[in-house]
Every structure is written in structure tokens, then in C-alpha cells.
Amino acid sequence: MTHPEQASHTQLRNIERDTGRSVAEWGDIVRSAGLERHGQILAFLKAEHSLTHGNANALALAVRALEAGPVGDEDLLAQQYAGPKAALRPTYEEIVTIAQGLGDDVVVSVKKTGVSLRRRKQFALVEAPSSRRVRLGLNLTGTPPTERLRARTGMCTHAVDIADPDDVDDEVATWLHQAYQQAG
């Protein structure tokens, strides 16, 4: 299965190959046109350079990211666990430590608002929706909910709220292991 980051990278390589211009060169073109907003860049690339909607969108995102400068995983985590949420960072770290101990194939993918834990597919999602708790979303198909492990809809089938690193107990570790196994 292809990860979204790999698919995006492949698409950008294909755009560079097909157009003969690198993302940096496209950035220069967009900058010289005086465009900054995504919609403006998208329309410009489609109208003036005959790119398809999908390629123009991918390129607009890449150009804007290039202009914003590199943002690493640590920067994204610092933003997620800043201010009143700073006290939740040890809880996040404990969850990720357990997940990484499940196997060498665990991928920790830090995003703007959460951290995806993946194997061949996502098996868990760690988010800090408030300053009082970390929400651990789990993909546990066929697992009945409990008072602590709530059923959800969306990216994860279940969720558990965790307020403290000590709450990342054997039960949470078991759920992480089950979700990891199902993602294999």
C-alpha cells in the first residue's frame, strides 16, 4: 500500500519530469506572478500552464510549503503540545514508545493536528483535543466498546481519553497491540 506522502512525492516528481521544471522553479514562477493564496496559485497553474486540477493542486501545495520553509516533526509536535497542552506531552510520548515497541514496521507520522501510527495502514491516531486529555483513536474492527473504550465513526473505530502518562496502562497497551495486529 502506498503512503500518502509517497504518492504526493511521486506526483511531484512526475510533474517535474513532464514540465521540465522543478518545484523550486515553479515557486519562482508563482512568486514572480505575485501570487500567495492557494486558490490564486491553483487557477494560475491551470489557466496559464495548462496543468490538470490534480497536478495544479499538488504543485500549489508544494510551492506554498516551500515558501513557508521546512517544518519538521518536532516543530509540529511543539505546536500541538504548546501552552496549556504542554503537560500532555509525556502522555503522548508514552503512547508512542509503546507503539514503537510493537514492531520495526511502525511508522510515526506527525501531522499538523495529530500523530498517525501506521503499519501497512493506520492503526492509531494520537491527538490533544483539549488541555486536559490526549485522545487515542484506535482501529479495532470487531471490538465491542467498553465504558473506557468508546466506539467512534471516522478515521478510527474506537477512542480512549488519557489524562496522564500513568493512565497509559496494560489495557491501553493491549488495545494498541490489537490495533497494530489488525493493521498487518
Image (tube, helix red, strand yellow):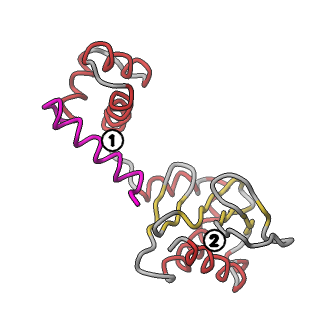
Nearer the observer, 134 or 171: 171
Q: Residue 23, located in which quarter of the rendered image?
A: top left
Q: Position of residue 160 (x, y in %)?
A: 74, 67
Residue toward you, 5 or 50: 50
Identify residue for label 1.
69
Element marked by disc 2: helix
| Cα gap from disc 2 to disc 1, whole angstroms | 29 Å
The circle on residue 32 is none
* Mark 2 or mark 1: whose residue is earlier in sequence: 1
Q: Residue at x 33, y 41 (%)?
A: 69
Q: Which mark is residue 91?
A: 2
Determine whether, in the image, residue 116 is placed left or right of residue 166.
left
Tell whether position 2 is magenta. yes
Magenta residues?
1-23
**Disc 1 residue type (three-letter):** Gly
Tell me the residue at 64%/81% (across/down): 173
Q: Nearer the viewer, residue 127 or 8?
A: 8
